[in-house]
């Protein structure tokens, strides 16, 4: 069998005769004119319907004081954006995917707004619990100062707590994964203490920490510490033995193994932990701001609820969502830089 | 005491090596082997004969129960060093490092300063004609290219003992041919010791000066065959009669071993 192979084998004298190539990623075709026109047209029609519903249906049970109309300008703005991006799709062809993404959002938003506006106009749903879209939009204009200040306060609390918690989580996770002693000694306590919800620490946090701000930082840090630590730990535990052996047989010592093999190999997991813990950190943020801070989105929500200004509650909720997108995008930017070698990672 | 002299001179010395995997799979049974410095030796045998285990023990990434292993006077028992580097069948490049950074990693691990390692890595990449792929990540390279980098990163370190664990068996014919010649030239010029584990008879006979034949479980060394061909192996035709003679001999031996192993399994009642 092998000798047959031998006989057919042709001696090749040149070295480096193999010329394998770098594999190029597949090119994705651009969306066609038809798709662009269809989506843009749909968006325009839907938002014209929104405008019509809003302006043509008479308000049932109207009060003496007519509220400022913010929906009409907003709808016109959306129409403007739709038309501008329609033009952009033809001028800058490479941007067509992004233009389509805008249309998808606009269309869904418009479709949701139509029944909402109809119900609002016919007084099927009533304020304050179910305010009109116009009122919610109005919050961003009339109360923008307080809202911006709240965003700044919330971001400060979130970032400080989250960064402290994440650094602690990564450090603990590395120690647990790297040293058998550390994991043997602390496993029980981590299992016991880690899953205690951060909110359960509120009574203790208020007593220990001098201000509600520092107590809030502790709560957020605690909430983000546990997921980051567990994911880092599992990342370290999952480092392929093959790669550790490869590094060792090239002469790497323990320090190099940790720095150049264990940490990069665990990094994808660490980022999963960072992403997960950000969700918990946001939840705790709102709770922490109920401990008596002077400004912040959580405070803003509680405060508005107290005055029965539910339109402000919803406006602040949307800001929270947007804030999450911004923070996660930041984290994912860092991740994409560090994990550029990985294919098919989750986009945000 | 000739044995000790051999080991201290830079050779590999394996004495009464015994390795059992739990629960009771005997991978190596009383294996003794003396290999002088600068030799190119192939180890061949049916799968499961413990040839890879022997290689891993020499690299220091596998433990053993009894016996002694020395390389260049140093006792090997789970201790790794850049002096004993392995070219793996599954390559094992670091996926987060570019091709060139993988080579630089090896040089830095050997103890070179960062800047010097980077410079030498670039030189090595260039010498192998791989500049076009220097900044590519392993995932972007084909299998043959990856192993080229894998070989490059070991050779760049200039280890005293190059351990090859079926390094080219997953490659296509052209890539295998090119890397075989690469290794042969390197060995001829540098005279570092090479221990080459393979299950490919043609490869073992074509590459090595001596071929160690091992039997199936438990792993025992059956015979050591000298390959009576010039050291400039690239001048030898792959279908030359002497080569074919040795290959036929080795082949028959392995066929025997495989048959025996089958019979033994039948007796046990699998």
Image: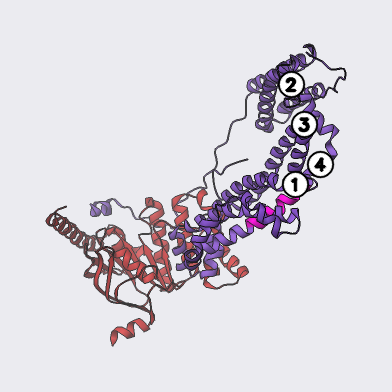
Chain colours: A purple, B red
Question: According to the image, label 3 marks what residue?
Answer: A308
Label 3 to label 1: alpha-carbon separation = 22 Å
* Mark 3 / mark 1, whichever is N-terminal: 1
Label 2 to label 4: alpha-carbon separation = 28 Å
Magenta stretch secondary structure, dominant: helix
Q: Nearer the viewer, mark 2 or mark 1?
A: 2
Give the structural element (helix, strand or loop) at label 3.
loop
What residue is rendered at 37% in x and 69% in y?
B194
Q: Are marks 2 and 4 on the same chain?
A: yes
Q: Residues within 10 Å of mark 2 (few under 14, many from 20)?
A: few
Residue A221 sits in quarter: bottom right
Give the structural element (helix, strand or loop) at label 2.
loop
Residue A110 image position (x, y, % from top left):
70, 22
Label 4 to label 1: alpha-carbon separation = 10 Å
What residue is rendered at 65% in x and 31% in y?
A97
* Mark 3 / mark 2, whichever is N-terminal: 2
A257 or B234, nearer to the observer: A257
Q: Is residue B229 above or below residue A173?
A: below
Q: Which chain carries label 4?
A: A
Residue B7 sits in quarter: bottom left
Question: According to the image, label 2 marks what residue?
Answer: A126
Q: Is residue B63 left or right of residue A37?
A: left
For the record, the magenta segment spans: A153-166
Label 4 to label 3: alpha-carbon separation = 21 Å
Residues under numbered marks 4 and 3 in contact, where contact means CB atoms less than 8 Å apart:
no
Residue B198 image position (x, y, % from top left):
31, 60
Question: According to the image, label 4 marks what residue?
Answer: A148
What residue is rendered at 57% in x and 48% in y?
A272
Q: Is residue B189 magenta?
A: no
* Mark 4 / mark 3, whichever is N-terminal: 4
Q: In this view, does B195 lie above or below A303?
A: below
Label 3 to label 2: alpha-carbon separation = 13 Å
């Amino acid at each position: 069998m092998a000798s047959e192979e031998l006989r057919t084998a042709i001696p090749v004298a040149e070295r480096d005769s193999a010329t394998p190539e770098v594999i190029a990623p597949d090119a994705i075709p651009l969306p066609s004119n038809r798709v662009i026109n269809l989506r843009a047209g749909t968006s325009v029609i839907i938002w014209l319907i929104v405008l019509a519903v809003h302006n043509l249906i008479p308000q049932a049970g109207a009060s003496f004081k007519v509220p400022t109309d913010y929906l009409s300008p907003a709808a016109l703005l959306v129409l403007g954006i739709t038309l501008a991006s329609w033009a952009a799709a033809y001028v800058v062809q490479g941007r067509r995917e992004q233009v389509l993404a805008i249309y998808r959002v606009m269309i869904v938003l418009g479709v949701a707004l139509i029944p909402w506006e109809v119900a609002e106009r016919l007084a099927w749903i009533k304020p304050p619990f179910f305010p009109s879209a116009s009122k919610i939009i109005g919050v961003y204009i009339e109360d923008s100062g307080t809202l911006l200040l709240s965003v700044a306060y919330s971001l400060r609390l979130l970032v400080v707590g989250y960064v402290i918690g994440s650094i602690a989580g990564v450090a603990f996770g590395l120690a647990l994964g790297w040293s058998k002693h550390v994991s043997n000694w602390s496993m029980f306590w981590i299992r016991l203490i880690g899953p205690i919800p951060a909110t359960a620490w509120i009574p203790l946090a208020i007593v220990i920490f001098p201000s509600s701000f520092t107590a809030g930082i502790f709560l957020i840090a605690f909430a983000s510490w546990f997921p980051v630590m567990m994911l880092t730990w599992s990342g370290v535990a999952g480092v392929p033995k093959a790669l550790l052996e490869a590094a060792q047989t090239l002469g790497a010592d323990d320090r190099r193994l940790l720095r150049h093999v264990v940490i990069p190999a665990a990094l994808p997991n660490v980022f999963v932990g960072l992403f997960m813990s950000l969700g918990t950190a946001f939840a705790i943020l709102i709770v922490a701001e109920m401990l008596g801070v002077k400004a912040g989105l959580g405070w803003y929500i509680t405060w508005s609820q107290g005055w029965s200004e539910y339109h402000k509650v919803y406006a602040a909720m949307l800001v929270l969502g947007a804030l999450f997108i911004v923070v996660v995008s930041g984290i994912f930017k860092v991740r994409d830089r560090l994990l550029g070698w990985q294919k098919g990672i989750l986009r945000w | 005491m000739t044995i000790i002299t051999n080991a201290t001179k830079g050779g590999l010395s394996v004495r009464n090596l015994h390795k059992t995997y739990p629960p009771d799979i005997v991978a190596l049974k009383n294996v003794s082997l003396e290999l002088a410095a600068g030799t190119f030796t192939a180890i061949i045998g049916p799968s499961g004969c413990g040839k890879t285990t022997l290689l891993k023990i020499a690299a220091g990434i596998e433990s053993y129960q009894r016996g002694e292993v020395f390389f260049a006077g140093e006792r090997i028992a789970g201790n790794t060093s850049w002096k004993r580097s392995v070219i793996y069948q599954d390559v094992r490049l670091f996926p987060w490092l570019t091709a060139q950074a993988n080579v630089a990693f090896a040089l830095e691990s050997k103890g070179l300063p960062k800047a010097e390692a980077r410079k030498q890595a670039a030189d090595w990449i260039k010498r192998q004609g791989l500049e076009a792929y220097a900044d590519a990540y392993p995932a972007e390279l084909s299998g043959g290219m990856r192993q080229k980098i894998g070989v490059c990163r070991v050779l760049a370190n200039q280890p005293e003992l190059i351990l090859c664990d079926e390094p080219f068996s997953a490659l296509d014919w052209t890539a295998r041919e090119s890397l075989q010649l690469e290794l042969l030239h390197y060995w001829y010029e540098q005279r570092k010791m090479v221990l080459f584990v393979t299950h490919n008879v043609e490869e073992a006979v074509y590459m090595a000066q001596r071929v160690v034949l091992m039997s199936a479980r438990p792993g025992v060394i059956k015979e050591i065959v000298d390959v009576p061909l010039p050291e400039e192996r690239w001048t030898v035709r792959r279908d030359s009669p002497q080569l074919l003679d040795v290959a036929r001999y080795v082949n028959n031996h392995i066929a025997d071993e495989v048959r025996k192993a089958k019979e033994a399994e039948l007796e046990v009642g699998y």
